[in-house]
Amino acid sequence: MRPAFLIALPLFALPAFAETPLEAALSAPAEGPAYKFDLKLEGDDLNAEAQVDPSLPEGERLVLISPAADTLEGDAAERYADLKANTSGDKIWCSSFKENIPADAKMISESGEAAVYSFTPLPGDDEETAKVYKHLTGRVTVSKDAPGILAFEMFAEKPFKPAMVAKIDSFSMKANCARAPDGRTYIQAFALDISGNAMMQPFSQSERREVTNLVALPDSADTALGQR
């Protein structure tokens, strides 16, 4: 038989555990309408402006505005073809970063409006990605007023070797988020810079993306386009 004082213990006497700002941000609604938007791209192979419309057929959702597609040659033409084939228009949401954030992320700073957490990013199931991510530091900034991710970054604090024949001298990925009309946060600005060498050959990669002018697609809230 249990002691009487345990049986009579009122429910309100049990301890309550408040949700942390990170937990609130990661549990914020991820569903909503789909949006078409403008995309500005600056990279090693292609500088372009385009419009992305998720309501168009797959493989046709990215429409190049400038330069004209028929003027592209070489690496620029290949980069455009890859973007056109693989741009879905539903990968702009900052909630997608939550799969890289472990449960043991540690708060490193806090203000009245936001909190910043640091962690070793989770790589998912890809073994090659895991070889890189284990050397990186991740940081996420979350809103305390309206739960959501405000910024996300991963960076290497020192050079590392993900493989015997490769060395990464520097790695930096940053994403700044803004509020969509429905309140979710999307990747408004993205920057990636990587340099190193592989098979005794130096390499570098640099890319900037900017997403603007979000316009909700009619009747999209109940379709699969808006469920990512």
Image (spheres, rainbow, N blue to C red):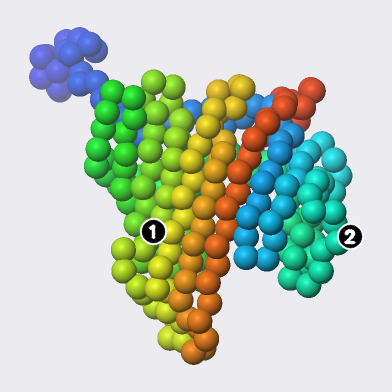
C-alpha distance separating marks 1 and 2: 37 Å
Q: Quadrant of residue 152?
A: top left
**Dot 2 amino acid type:** Asp
**Could you say where residue 121 lies in the image, as x and y percent from the top left?**
40, 55
Q: Name which quarter of the figure residue 19 lies in.
A: top left
Question: Up-down: is 121 above or below 161?
Answer: above
Label 1 neighbour load within 10 Å: few <14, some 14-19, many 20+: some
Query: Camera-side residue: 182 or 201?
Result: 201
Quadrant (top left/top right/bottom left/bottom right) for the C terminus: top right
Decide: is 142 above or below 171.
above
* Front-most of residues 141 and 3: 141
In the rendered image of this protein, does residue 57 appear above or below residue 5? below
Residue 160 visible to the viewer: yes
Question: Which quarter of the image is occupied by the N terminus?
Answer: top left
Q: Which residue is farthest bottom?
A: 200
Q: Can see residue 126?
A: no
The residue pinned by badge 1 equals 155
On screen, residue 167 above or below 93: below
Q: Secondary structure at mark 1?
A: strand
Badge nearest the viewer, 1 or 2? 2
Q: Which residue corresponds to the image point at 78% horizontal and 49% vertical from the top-left?
A: 66
Seen at 79% across and 23% down, the residue is: 218
Query: Quick one: label 2, few (<14), some, or many (20+) residues within 10 Å?
Result: few
Residue 147 is situated, as x and y percent measured from the top left of the image, at 43, 26
Numbered circle sitting on residue 216: none
Pointers 1 and 2 in contact (CB under 8 A)? no
Q: Position of residue 226 (x, y in %)?
A: 69, 32
Type of amino acid at the residue the image marks with label 1:
Phe
For marks 1 and 2 on the same chain, the one whose residue lies earlier in the sequence: 2
Write the residue at 46% across / 76% down: 196
Q: How many marks?
A: 2
Image mark for residue 70: 2
